[in-house]
Amino acid sequence: MTSDRDLFVAYGALMGGALLPIYHGAYASLRTPRSTIEKLKARKKLSDADLSDYEEELDESGLPETLTSEDAYWLPVLGSAVLFGMFLVFKYLDKVWVDRVLGFYFACVGSFAVTKAFLAVVTGVLGRERIKNMDLTKLQLSRRVRKGGIKGKESKPQDLLIVRLTNIHPPVVVLSSIVVGAYLWNKHWILSNVLALSLSLSSISLLALDSFKTGSIMLAGLFVYDVFWVFGTNVMVSVARGFDGPIKIVWPKNLVEGLFDGATDWKMTMLGLGDIVIPGIFIALALRYDQHRYAKVNEKLLITKHDVDFPKPYFKATLVAYVAGLATTMLVMHFTKAAQPALLYLSPACVGAIVITSLRLGQWSETWAYDSNEEDAKADEEAKRAKGEAAGEDEADDDDDDDDDNDEAAWEGVKDDGSNATQHPRSTRSSTRKRKTSTKTDK
């Protein structure tokens, strides 16, 4: 029989395993503020300053995938369809072949996630500066959009994909391939956890909520989803236990007994990736909002995604709330001896943390009005306005130069021909400017 000591060791391991991708995934989701990118682009255009240290920031194009409120409404529906579909597949098809197909699929997807996770570990060990000084190969996929049909004018190239490869990439890719191959070979629970945590890390760093309103809608919808599929049916528990793949992190409930007493039959406790990724992207939003507030107050500073030394009240509050919610889930599960929908506790905890923090700091309206897409749109408008003003100044300078030339020509005409003595030089300048403007319009 598994002792309480072994169970609490397992709960602690699951807690630590969940916090690892959430914490690092939130920091990996940080992006250089749009205002900084526009400043760097303007500096690069106006001067020959060395901006090699900011090359990565100049290549950024914002958050890769942004979830809006419309997406949040659909998540419980799509999640239910996928979950019930997997339940039917396991019920009516050969479980062995289903495991093989899904295992191969998750291994292929997980190989990229494992590579990314290992690269993050190596970068943390060696240091970002040492990595930057390595030989760099940059792969860039761009496209041009032609406006006005085949004979129209081409726009500036738009980057679709930018990949930077250094000397550490080949050995990391080889190591990742070995890990994934070993997982496919024997499906060991430790290797499964490596893939599951890597997938969680990648998901949290790549998926971004646009606002706390969207996040609250998502958590509320999945709150109902989780409660229904766990308490209302046995579908979720059946799928989680039936599929031996990296869709959950597991830990032996009798690990201590096995290490010291020689037990060989592992009895696992588990935590689904949904209970990590869903709250994780909400917590990542809180960290990006802290960064946004700091950048807004310090507009004159060139703040990049690597500048993480800023106040983080919202991030800390949601992280503590997640720990409290997950601990509550485990305690209830421990005493009731029944599976619990973790989002029943995690969703109110995370949303409540934002509510309490915004009220405590007197930032309720600002916090709930925040929308990353609108902020990016404002930054783009300001950048366009600044470019327009700069272009207007350049055109005005050109016009002034033309005016000087016209004035000289007019005065020369007065001196050379007495019939022009009654003509004011200003009229010549005015007519010349009108003619110039009409020429531009015709073009």
Image: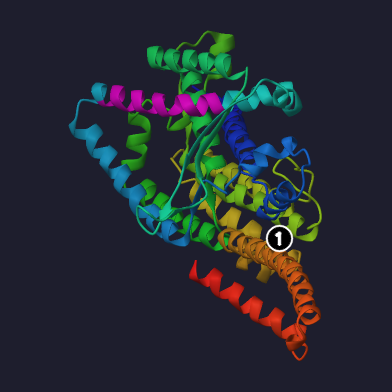
Which residue of the protein is positioned furthest toward the top in this rendering? Answer: 262
User: Viewed as shown, does residue 222 lie left or right of 210?
Assistant: left
Please say whether residue 101 is one of the residues in the magenta stretch: yes
Residue 180 higher or lower than 211, as above or below = above
Name the residue type under label 1: Thr
Please provide percent x and percent y for residue 328.
58, 45
Residue that label 1 marks: 357
Residue 86 higher or lower than 170, as above or below = below
Please provide percent x and percent y for residue 82.
31, 44
In this rendering, does residue 23 appear at all? yes
Which residue of the protein is positioned furthest toward the bottom in this rendering? Answer: 422
Q: What kind of element bears circle 1?
A: helix
Q: Nearer the viewer, residue 27 or 9?
A: 27
In this rendering, does residue 276 appear at all? no
* Residue positioned 60% across, 24% down in the render: 119
- Dominant SS of magenta comes to helix
Q: Nearer the viewer, residue 296 or 91?
A: 296
Query: What's the image's color scheme?
Result: rainbow
- Residue range of the region highlighted in magenta in the rendering: 98-116
Please provide percent x and percent y for residue 285.
61, 51
Q: Nearer the viewer, residue 349 or 278?
A: 278
User: Viewed as shown, does residue 24 lie left or right of 73?
Assistant: right
* Residue positioned 42% across, 49% down in the render: 226
